[in-house]
Amino acid sequence: MQAASRESYKLGAERLDAYVRGTEASAVASTAADLLSVADLLRREPRLRRALSDPARPGADRAGLLSEMLRGKVSAEALDLLASLVANRWSTPSELLEGTERLGVEALLASADTAGDLGEVEDELFRFGQVVAGQPGLSSALTDPIAPVGQRAGLARELLAGKARPVTISLVEVALSGFGGRSFTGALSRLVELTADRRDRQVAYVTAASPLSDEDERRLGASLSAIYGREVSVKQTVDPSVLGGVSVRVGSDLYDGTVLRRLNETRNALAKR
């Protein structure tokens, strides 16, 4: 986001935080659903996005237009949050969509936090990503650009029914919609990171040829926590092709100590001789 949009989103997020305090988890989850439904509307209606972010129109007029359209269709709480977003300045129409969608996600995470389920949601999102990555047929079905999002979301709900929390299922549906313009895999990873961030944690994606022991995982997490100055949530992927060692990615930082990397470096060095 550009500077103006970042400031507008920050104000909306602060308003959300004030609303969440003292509100039951179920009510926050319902508000999140309303926010995300409006994000879907903005995604489908580019002319509406432009009208609601038009810098030539006063913010109060834009908020009034939104309120007129949505009154009685979403909760009063959701309408208040949305009107506060629209009344502020957005650098581009697409960034208004991004901000609305992000606020809906943060509301979902806040509901899980209030219910004490945030850690479980983080793990469920990551595990579902692992399941999808390990089954090419399922991955193709969920990422097929020709299939409607609703159809793919229905498949995800069927797979996760009784196995994941409602917030997790809702977040998977957000990922299928292309959260932030990302691919499904990229969106799911970003949602895992946002979930961890709400717990004041960093995510470390670890790839190894065989599973780390609990003790090795604990020590790795402690070492990374010392480097990054906050708790680290270690997410393991087992990939025999790396042969040995581990690869660790934290944000844009990559620490690759795998045997495969060393073999590739040796092969490249020999090829240059």
Image (cartoon, rainbow, N blue to C red):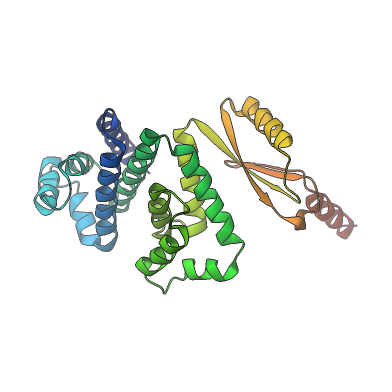
Quarter of the image where one finds residue 205: top right
In the image, residue 116 lies at what x, y percent?
42, 34
Above or below, comparing residue 140 to residue 219 in the picture: below
In the image, residue 119 lies at what x, y percent?
49, 38
In the image, residue 260 lies at what x, y percent?
79, 53
Image-based side of 194 in relation to 99, left or right: right
Quarter of the image where one finds residue 202: top right
In the image, residue 157 lies at what x, y percent?
41, 60
Residue 142 or residue 14, whichever sits in front: 142
Image-based side of 200 in relation to 153, left or right: right
Count the labels in the image: 0
Residue 42 or residue 174, whichever sits in front: 174
Residue 20 or residue 185, whichever sits in front: 20
Quarter of the image where one finds residue 11: top left
Q: Name the residue at 28% across, 32% down.
A: 20
Q: Name the residue at 45% across, 56% down.
A: 182
Q: Quadrant of the N terminus?
A: top left
The reply to whether residue 2 is in sight is no
Residue at the outermost front position: 162
Residue 273 or residue 166, whichever sits in front: 166
Q: Quadrant of the C terminus?
A: bottom right
The reply to whether residue 111 is in sight is yes
Above or below, comparing residue 57 to residue 272 in the picture: above
Residue at the outermost bottom position: 146
Image-based side of 127 in relation to 148, left or right: right
Q: Name the residue at 17% across, 39% down.
A: 80
Image-based side of 137 in relation to 90, left or right: right
